[in-house]
Image (cartoon, rainbow, N blue to C red):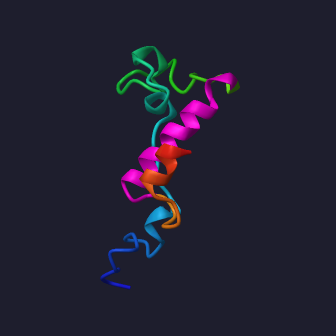
Amino acid sequence: MLFPSKATTWLGLPKIAFNVVPLQDVLRLGTEARQNTPGQASGNWSWRFRAEALTPELAGGIRLLTTTYGRAPVSESPASLAKG
């Protein structure tokens, strides 16, 4: 497919099929949580998160953002999520 519709990505997948967001950004962490530092040969890729950082409140915030910006299934609306 040369020219995908607005509902698909350049790979032909539905837009909601994937979205990559660094977990450090979602958790609002600073530079201490960097995955890697360009130009630094060692000490990269050692950051890890703790399971307790993934809270229901965080999930609700992510869900609200994905629906607000059109990245969630159409059956969900930002207004209905704000109430729930």
Image location (x, y in percent) of residue 59: 57, 38
Q: For the image shown, how many numbered marks are present on the structure?
A: 0
Measured from the top left, where is residue 75 in percent x and y? 53, 66
User: Looking at the image, which residue is at 47% across and 71% down?
Assistant: 14
Q: Residue, x 54% and y 27% (percent of image)?
A: 45
What residue range appears in magenta? 52-71
Check the image and report above or below for 55 versus 7.
above
* For residue 7, above or below residue 59: below
**Residue 51 percent coordinates (x, y):** 69, 26
- In this rendering, position of residue 27 left or right of residue 53: left
Outermost residue on the front side: it is 83
Location of the N terminus (image quadrant): bottom left
55 or 16, nearer to the observer:
55
Q: Main secondary structure of the magenta part?
A: helix
User: Nearest the camera: 36 or 51?
Assistant: 51
Residue sitting at x 49%, y 38%: 61
Q: What residue is rendered at 55% in x and 33% in y?
A: 58
